Amino acid sequence: MAEGYLTTHVLDTARGCPAAKLAVSLYRIEGETRSLLAQMVTNADGRTDSPILPKGEFAVGIYELVFEAGDYLDAAGVPVEEPRFLDIVPIRFGISDPEAHYHVPLLLSPFGMSTYRGS
């Protein structure tokens, strides 16, 4: 049985704090099909309260995390641009080891973002 799981952590690098109350969705990508697996909101620490893809549901494949950055920036009081430079932030990645912990953090500011495979 697969023991892997998926987590994220969103940090607001412009304000120097966790990005709380940021909506995150997870999709599995199979060819042209995009299937919604989970929707969560980050907590005060910028993390979800549970793994986005928990043990037992973890499988090899292509996934996409979608971060609702524009809504978060609006709520954080960042002056609105029309359109926002960053609004919806998708990160598509592959899971190849079904027994590993995949951690996909997002470092976010109104004009930039970065990600990496964390631990």
Image: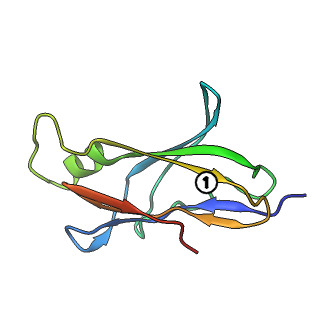
* Residue displayed at 54% across by 66% down: 117
Residue 95 higher or lower than 37, as above or below: below
Q: Amino acid at mark 1?
A: Ile
Residue sitting at the far right: 1
**Could you say which is closer to the camera, residue 65 or residue 115?**
115
Q: How is the image coloured?
A: rainbow
User: Neighbour class for label 1 at 10 Å: few (<14), some, many (≥20)?
Assistant: many
The image shows residue 4 at horizontal and vertical percentages of 75, 62
Looking at the picture, tell me which residue is in the foreground, 80 or 59: 59
Q: Residue furthest top?
A: 32
- Quadrant (top left, top right, bottom left, bottom right) of the N terminus: bottom right
Residue 64 appears at what percent x and percent y? 54, 44
Q: Residue at x 20, y 47 (%)?
A: 74
The residue identified by callout 1 is 52
Q: In which quadrant will I find the C terminus?
A: bottom right
Is any atom of residue 105 visible in this view? Answer: yes
